[in-house]
Amino acid sequence: MLALQYVRSVPAYALVRATGGHPSVVTSDLSMLHLGDVLEPGLPGPGWMRVRPNLSGICGSDTAAITGHASLYLDPLTSYPFVPGHEVVGELDDGTRVVVEPALGCLVRGIAPECARCAEGRPGLCENVTEGAVEVGLQTGYCASTGGGWGEVLVAHESQLHAIPERLPDDAAVLVEPLACCIHAALRGAASPHDVVVVQGAGTIGLLTVAAVRLFTPPKRLIAVAKYPFQREQAKRLGADMLVDPDEVFQRVRFATRARRLDGVDRPLLLGGADLTFECTGSARGLNDAVRFTRAGGRVVAVGMPGEERIDWGPIWQRELTVTGAYAYGTEKTGERTFELALQAAPDLALKQLTGPLFSLGDYRDAIAYALHAGRQNAVKVAFDLRDLRA
């Protein structure tokens, strides 16, 4: 089958890192990403099915891996070579349209009894990700056994598959997986009706976090920090009360919360500030700003995937902030599965407005280059369209 493979290579990784992940390098033959014929993954056991991807998104975690910016913490939680792509809408052999829930927990791996985290309904935190029926991997798209959405076929356990409502087209359904992540983050943050909430960043994760917070935990005021015009337009549409440029965030949050601003040597800080911040950029700047404009005793939820960033822990310590990670999805404290919540919410969010342009696998170099600078090109979710491979 035709697929893009991520092939582990120390020299290629060193080259990509040395050039800062420049598009001309990460899409060249010297990179770790290669297009070619690979073996179709076999079914690991009972309950597994073949999925033929229709669309597969290019996620920030994918580009982080390709550009050498992903945290090396994730390396022993991954098996190589793997076919990327975990934001997948596809079809089963009988034609049923499905989205894939990528987490490879105990149930998927055929392990019983389940580990404590899977028993809690949190397969993204599985403690057996090196065991069972498939190779090491936190998720589909980072596991050598399963394939991924950037290939003609992947395999998934029946527990990972969710049928898509008829009224949800492929170019909206491809965003169900990141929407599920953001609903989980919103529920982790648990904003109250009295809170002033900031969503820092307005890429895919930031915009869907705005939507999730507005739908599931609506606060007193929801502020979106968005850099580009199209991002601001979509943040407003999805429920933000106020739109803020990154360079103005301290001043605008100051006025919105009646805080006091102090200017330091490197960046400002607020006395007072947001009650709750969802940090969706995963960048050093975003994280360092968030802990300085979130009020003392407040909460910061890290939603965007960070690498090994240089973070000043002084504000976290002195302000007694609660910093929480939000990764993946599962069964929430309400007893509802996050993916089911996402599938229920998605049809009314007009998510197809966030999707595009679409690229064929053969045009992967253009696709990756576009995705690396999607915001400035008025795009949010760049994706591969594999439907033409079955034409």
Image (cartoon, helix red, strand yellow):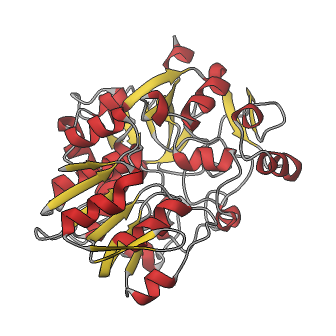
Horizontal arrangement in the rendering, residue 109 relative to residue 351 (left or right): right
The answer, for residue 151, to whether it is visible in the render is no
Residue 101, x across and y down, in percent: 42, 50
Left or right, 322 with respect to 197, comes to right
Residue in the image at 27% along x and 69% along y = 274
Q: Residue at x 77, y 35 (%)?
A: 25
In the displayed structure, 220 sits above or below 1; it is below
Q: Which x, y percent locates residue 289?
A: 44, 66
- Taking the image as shown, residue 314 lies to the left or right of residue 161, namely right
Q: Where is residue 72 in the image (x, y as percent from the top left)?
A: 69, 64
From this view, report whether residue 298 is shown above or below residue 44.
below
Residue 221 picture quarter:
bottom left
**Image quarter in which the N terminus is found:** top right
Query: Where 360 sits versus 254, above or below?
Result: above
Q: Which residue ends up furthest to the top in the rendered image?
A: 391
Q: In this view, does 168 lie above or below 83?
A: above
Q: Quadrant of residue 370?
A: top right
Circle count: 0
Measured from the top left, where is residue 185 in percent x and y? 33, 62
The answer to whether residue 7 is visible is: yes
- Residue beneath the point at 49% across and 73% down: 112
Considering depth in this image, is 95 or 129 the residue closer to the camera? 129
Residue furthest right in the image: 11
